[in-house]
Image: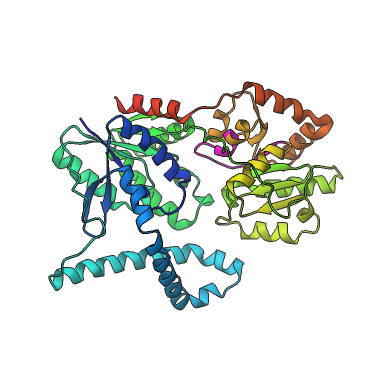
């Protein structure tokens, strides 16, 4: 029996691996040592091809220069076709962005079909950049593991299901969360739709599902009950803690706060920075002092109104600072030099910033919902993410008499890093069903 790992996401990714790509890579380097084989899907010619991790690295090096030209041409084309959109104000572009994404997705699909149809009508041979790679040949009893963001390319799952029916392979589907199904208000509308359609098929077709938290496992069990789906085996595999960089940390430029609380995560509606704004305003009304709060995270969707509030509120903009472009070394500095961290997210599949905070020896004040309750085991305190008063009171409690210092000492002495090797051992156990 061969384990086949889908690394299509790695083949098309550019830059350092983060998020889903980081998870795929961490597991893949360990699976390769244990004899697993890897494949990717070529949509242009509709085939699975076998690839190695070395091929992924070589592909990234070989086409780095060519990508500059491709990006330049693509940028010029976008400016020509989307000129009116790019000239809009930031808030207007934010409102239209979900619709623009749909148009981009549909346009790419149409162009792909035109290329295929043209080759068929004019008997042209379609030349793929992956033509040198051999076919991935699945055999009966093989286990195919899907770790990536399959909802972005559902044709992969469709082809795997066809192979499963004809060949007799088994399928493991890795799922971080199904939040777009149960919390659609926190995502762009088109994502909730395509994600829901994908998961309806993925859950039905999987022989085993691996998840990253008990909260996600519970959500999938509920989904199966509600939709009368036979529940597959579901195993929890905790993500590894990313190792702290050995590089020297660096203070962000133009940053001058001496004491501050740190919040890490994409500036999007799900991260619930609205609660921080409300807690700050409540403290202002009641004349209670709380330290500046620094938010470190790239811009995300459905957050334009809150950014406007923070940027234009005379008091809030002195209490809340948003850093939207923070390097790894700068983030490390922020963790090391903050008083403690706060994580007000409404819902998570896991809650990586909590684990990162604990790794840096910093106590975290977190939302007390979903998977966030699974991290820290007594080293984290919680508040309801819909209650700004409770949030403000908790901040004030730990700042008063510097109680956070004792909490930080407890974290530094008691938190045990969960390594990627330990996470992989859990994955191996799950795959040996």
Residue 85, horizontal then vertical, whole percent: 52, 73
Q: Residue furthest top?
A: 414
Q: Residue at x 25, y 70 (%)?
A: 114
Classify the position of the C terminus by image quarter: top left
Residue 407, placed above or below residue 322: above
Residue 253, horizontal then vertical, whole percent: 70, 54
Q: Quadrant of residue 227?
A: top left
Q: Nearer the viewer, residue 420 or 156?
A: 420
Q: Is residue 231 visible?
A: no
Residue 63, placed above or below residue 227: below
Q: Quadrant of residue 378?
A: top right
324 part of magenta stretch: no
166 lies left or right of 24: left
Give the magenta-colored segment's residue range: 340-355
Q: Is residue 115 visible?
A: yes
Q: Nearer the viewer, residue 201 or 372?
A: 372
Q: Residue at x 38, y 33 (%)?
A: 210
Residue 370, horizontal then vertical, whole percent: 54, 35
328 lies left or right of 394: left
Q: Residue at x 66, y 58 (%)?
A: 307
């Amino acid at each position: 029996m061969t384990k086949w790992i889908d690394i299509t996401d790695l083949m098309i990714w550019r830059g350092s691996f983060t998020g889903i790509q980081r998870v795929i890579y961490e597991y893949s380097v360990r699976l390769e040592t244990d004899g697993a084989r890897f494949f990717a899907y070529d949509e242009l010619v509709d085939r699975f091809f076998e690839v190695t991790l070395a091929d992924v690295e070589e592909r990234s090096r070989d086409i780095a220069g060519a990508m500059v030209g491709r990006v330049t041409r693509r940028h010029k084309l976008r400016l020509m076709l989307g000129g009116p959109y790019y000239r809009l104000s930031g808030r207007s572009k934010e409102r239209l962005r979900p619709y623009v994404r749909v148009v981009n997705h549909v346009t790419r699909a149409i162009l792909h079909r035109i290329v295929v149809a043209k080759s068929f009508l004019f008997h042209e041979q379609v030349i793929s950049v992956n033509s040198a790679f051999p076919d991935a040949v699945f055999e009966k009893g093989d286990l195919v593991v899907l770790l990536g963001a399959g909802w972005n390319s559902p044709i992969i799952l469709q082809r795997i299901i066809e192979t499963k029916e004809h060949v007799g392979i088994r399928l493991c589907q890795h799922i971080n969360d199904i939040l777009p199904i149960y919390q659609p208000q926190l995502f762009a509308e088109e994502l909730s739709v395509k994600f829901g359609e994908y998961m309806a098929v993925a859950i039905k077709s999987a022989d085993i599902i691996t998840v990253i938290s008990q909260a996600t496992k519970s959500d999938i069990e509920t989904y199966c009950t509600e939709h009368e789906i036979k529940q597959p085996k579901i195993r929890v595999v905790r993500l590894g803690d990313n190792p702290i960089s050995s590089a020297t940390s660096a203070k962000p430029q133009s940053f001058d706060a001496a004491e501050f609380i740190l919040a890490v995560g994409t500036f999007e509606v799900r991260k619930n920075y609205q609660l921080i704004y409300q807690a700050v305003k409540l403290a202002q009304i009641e004349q209670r002092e709380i330290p500046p709060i620094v938010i470190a995270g790239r811009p995300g969707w459905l957050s334009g109104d809150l950014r406007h509030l923070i940027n234009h509120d005379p008091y809030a903009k002195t209490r809340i600072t948003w850093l939207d472009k923070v390097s790894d070394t700068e983030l490390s500095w922020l963790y090391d030099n903050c008083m403690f961290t706060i994580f007000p997210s409404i819902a998570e599949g896991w809650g990586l910033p909590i684990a990162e905070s604990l790794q840096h020896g910093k106590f975290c004040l977190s939302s007390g919902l979903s998977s966030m309750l699974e991290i820290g085991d007594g080293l984290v305190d919680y508040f309801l993410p819909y209650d700004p008063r409770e949030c403000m009171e908790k901040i004030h409690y730990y700042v008063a008499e510097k109680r956070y210092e004792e909490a930080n000492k407890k974290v530094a002495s008691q938190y045990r890093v969960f390594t990627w090797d330990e996470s992989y051992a859990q994955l191996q156990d799950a795959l040996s069903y």
